[in-house]
Image (cartoon, rainbow, N blue to C red):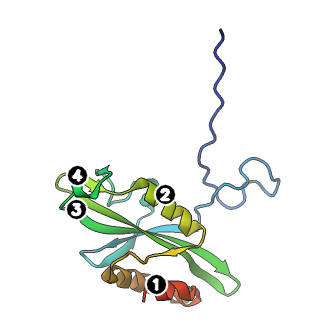
């Protein structure tokens, strides 16, 4: 019996602009991550920063860390929030359209951490779909994130939905 050749799997496509030039063929409907940025909130330090390495789990926070599936396995982990921020453009200018936060802890001493990969992927997807999901963040981290977004571009903050402003109030 002859072995059937395996079909090549279609992987996750990250495209810039419209690579299909409107032809409607292969690649149509692929997600563009061009307008998304990962923002880390360091809970203990009270700072926020962008690290594009998080798009592929290669951020400064994540490098050299083996992530475990349960939080209790990393009892001394330093808390972080990874916030997926998606920007949309209006005729008046860009605004923060999708903002979702994921919990993460890192213990550098034992090189272990906690994060739920399914949660991170789902929250990334929700941000791309223009959802605001930051209710479960602690108040200090919400304040840090709000100030970071306001300082990054006050116009973008002003044009953002009231839902985001109230969620981070």
Q: Which residue does the numbered mark 2 point to in the structure image?
A: 121
Q: Nearer the viewer, residue 61 or 9?
A: 9
Residue identified by numbered label 4: 111
Residue in the picture at 24% in, 74% down:
44
How far, Cα to Cα, is label 3 from label 1?
Answer: 26 Å
> How far apart, in angstroms, are the residues tagged by discs 4 and 2?
23 Å
Q: Which residue is mark 3?
A: 77
Mark 2 Cα within 10 Å, few/some/many (few <14, many 20+)? few
Return the disc, 3 or 2, that comes first in the chain's sequence.
3
Disc marking residue 167 = 1
Disc on the earlier residue, 4 or 1: 4
Q: Which one is nearer the viewer's eye here, 59 or 8?
A: 8
Residue 26 image offset from top left, x and y in percent = 74, 47
Q: Nearer the viewer, mark 4 or mark 3?
A: 3
Q: CA distance from mark 3 to mark 2?
A: 21 Å
Residue 81 placement (x, y as % from top left): 36, 69
Callout in the foreground (3, 1): 1
């Amino acid at each position: 019996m002859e072995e059937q050749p395996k079909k090549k799997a279609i992987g996750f496509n990250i495209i810039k602009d419209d690579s299909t030039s409107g032809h409607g063929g292969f690649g149509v409907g692929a997600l563009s991550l061009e307008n998304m940025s990962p923002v880390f909130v360091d809970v203990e330090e009270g700072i926020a920063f962008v690290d594009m390495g998080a798009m592929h789990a290669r951020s400064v926070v994540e490098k050299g860390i083996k992530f475990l599936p349960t939080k209790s396995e990393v009892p001394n982990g330093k808390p972080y929030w990874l916030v997926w921020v998606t920007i949309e453009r209006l005729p008046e200018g860009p605004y923060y359209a999708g903002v979702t936060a994921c919990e993460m802890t890192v213990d550098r001493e034992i090189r272990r951490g906690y994060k739920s990969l399914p949660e991170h992927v789902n929250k990334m997807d929700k941000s791309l779909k223009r959802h605001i999901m930051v209710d479960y963040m602690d108040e200090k981290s919400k304040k840090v994130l709000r100030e970071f977004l306001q300082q990054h571009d006050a116009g973008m903050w002003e044009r953002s939905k009231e839902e985001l402003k109230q969620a981070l109030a």
